[in-house]
Image (spheres, rainbow, N blue to C red):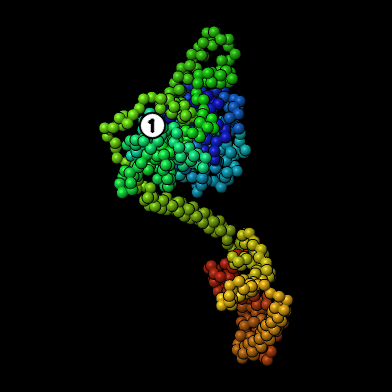
Amino acid sequence: MAFPSSSSSFSPRASDDTVFYAIYTESPTRTSIATLHSLHLQILESITPLTEGYIWQHQPFTLSVSTPPNASCPCPSSSHLPHLHGHLRFADNLEDEWFTVFLLFRLSLRFPSLSLRLWDSDGDFLLIEAAFHLPRWLNPDTSLHRLFLRNGTLRIVPQTLPNPSLPDSLAFVAGSQSLASDSIQRAIQNRIKDYPDRARKNMHKVRVRLPVSVAHVLKHEPRLISLAVEGFYDRDIDTMKFASTMERFLERGKAEELVRVSVMMSRAMYAQLVQQRFQAPKCYPEMPGRAEREGFVEAELGMKVACGMEMMYQQRKRDGVEGRGSTWEVFRKSLEDSGYFQGLLPGSSEYQRLMQSAQEYFRSTSLHSRESDLMNAPVKRIDEILALPHSVDDFKDHEIPPSDDDSWLYDGEEELNSVLMERQKEMELYDLKHKKKAKAKEDQNTGPSAASNAADEFDPSDIAKTMQAFVHKLSSYKGAEAPEDRNKEVDLDVDQFIKDMESVMKHSGGEVANNNTEEGSSSDLDFDDSDESDIAELDEDNEDREDNFMRFYSDAMNEELKATTLQKSFVRADEQIPKKDQGTSNASEHIMDEDFSPVDVDVNLVKSFLDSFSSQQGLPGPASNLLGLMGVQLPQDAKKGK
């Protein structure tokens, strides 16, 4: 674990897969640099036992002292406040992010007067975890400066404090009760309750066969395995050229001997190595055959690690991205720039006291910044290690522990299903809760007065109007869309669609017809003028035949319907909708015997809907569902039950 003490070590341009965090004291505006240094050391002592032996995916948990003005602070609103901050890139390993969340919760419990913030590229991601339990007003647009960790709990600045600034929110959570609801607290705590044991479970130990030089480097710096895996997993054409020669780690080429060692890495790293196929470069030492399964698997994994180490080393050396690490001069300069020495003259007793305090602080933090320096400047450290004497004999006659079981890599379906079931249960409880609220609200809005108001406002002509709009609405290939549908309309040119379909059908028919023709014959789409005129005449004849057929068919159907009682079920243009108490006998008096009088389509439509809705007796049914979809609310029958 590492905690660079200089604020200049923080990179403001972190990648998207990064979690950020900031720690504020009780009164940040009055906090001195010396107080932050003292707090920094106390935090180091609290965190170190929890992170010891943990292999981070890309970089360790870091923490820096930030003094204003600090342009590198990831949160602009914090740049003028003295505080501690840090960031961690987790990439494909979400375990790193949630382990960081656990560490911050533990810190807030250990130091109850501190207020902590954390966020990632998605914003306040803790709210995402507790999405089913949040108040409606809290969303990504309103959560700025509202979410804090304090005394082991999650605090939310309420809506009563509109658009709070960071100092306002810090003062609020420090001076009043702002605890999040129990359901929100449980949702977050359930996510981190298994740490730190889960962090240790996330480590995977595996046997590999490596070139002596690579084994020698990992023996002295086991944490460099993360950079080696990163170099292999993120390889490109340029870096693979380095692996084809292996200049740094295979000085003897194919004559280099492979040694068997045990390597610790995260499960995510192991999966990144195993799941990718990679051909060994020609210069690589000979590996056991596939028949020797155990030996081949160990050698193949070792080959990927060695190539990744070579690619990482050469790329960093070529690009010159080596960090300078935490040196005393850099640290002292940062103290001077931040006003730590308060303008005192060098040599004065107070200046000497501050200098001695700063030196003790630097020595203490340097012990913890070693891992961060290693990740920032791996080339320098690798050169130092390879300069030390080493040989194959250093790795002989050593007992190598067996590899950990990797069935978790192939049998994760059960764990995934359990997580999905847990989320499904949350969703069902959330839906049930809101359905109960909606039903209670609906019961409050219903009653005699509500029913009478709905009846007074209801206009039967609305049914006809909405149905006409529905019928004339241009529908898409996805189906019919109600006028009140919220879905985005899909414009479909029906004429052009039909033309395209006819073109495809004709083209398909032409292909079938040409199956027996010789190769090289012209396409059926290449018509001359005479062909086009013939087709036009055929189309006109077809249209005439269709019109005649429809007329004959309509006349025959009308003659057949005259002999039935179907005509009695329609209301004519010169009739009124019969009232319920009059029955249907009055309606039949005006029906013509021999010929149909014009039918009022709108009146019949409204009558049919009302009859269908009445037959539902207040229960859900097709009439209420269809009208509700189109935005028409029918009142209940006030006379029902009387």
Of all residues shown, which one is farthest toward the top?
A: 348
Kindly tell me whether residue 306 is visible in this rendering: yes
Q: Nearer the viewer, residue 542 or 346?
A: 542
Residue at the (52%, 35%) spot, across then down: 20
Rendering quarter of residue 521: bottom right
Q: Dot 1, how many residues are within 10 Å of its Cα: few (below 14), some (14-19), or many (20+)?
A: many
Q: Position of residue 471 (x, y in %)?
A: 66, 71
Residue at the (43%, 38%) spot, across then down: 307
Q: Nearer the viewer, residue 589 or 406?
A: 406
Q: Position of residue 480 (x, y in %)?
A: 61, 67
Q: Position of residue 291 (x, y in %)?
A: 31, 49
Give the position of the C terminus as an image quadrant: bottom right
With 588 as the anchor, is 66 left or right in this view?
left
Residue at the (51%, 28%) spot, across then down: 323
With 395 as the anchor, is 586 left or right in this view?
right
Q: Which residue is mark 1?
A: 213
Residue type, mark 1 in image: Ser
Q: Nearer the viewer, residue 53 or 576?
A: 53
Residue at the (48%, 40%) spot, across then down: 240
Q: Position of residue 2 (x, y in %)?
A: 45, 28
Q: Nearer the viewer, residue 279 or 605?
A: 279
Q: Is residue 401 above or below residue 444?
A: above
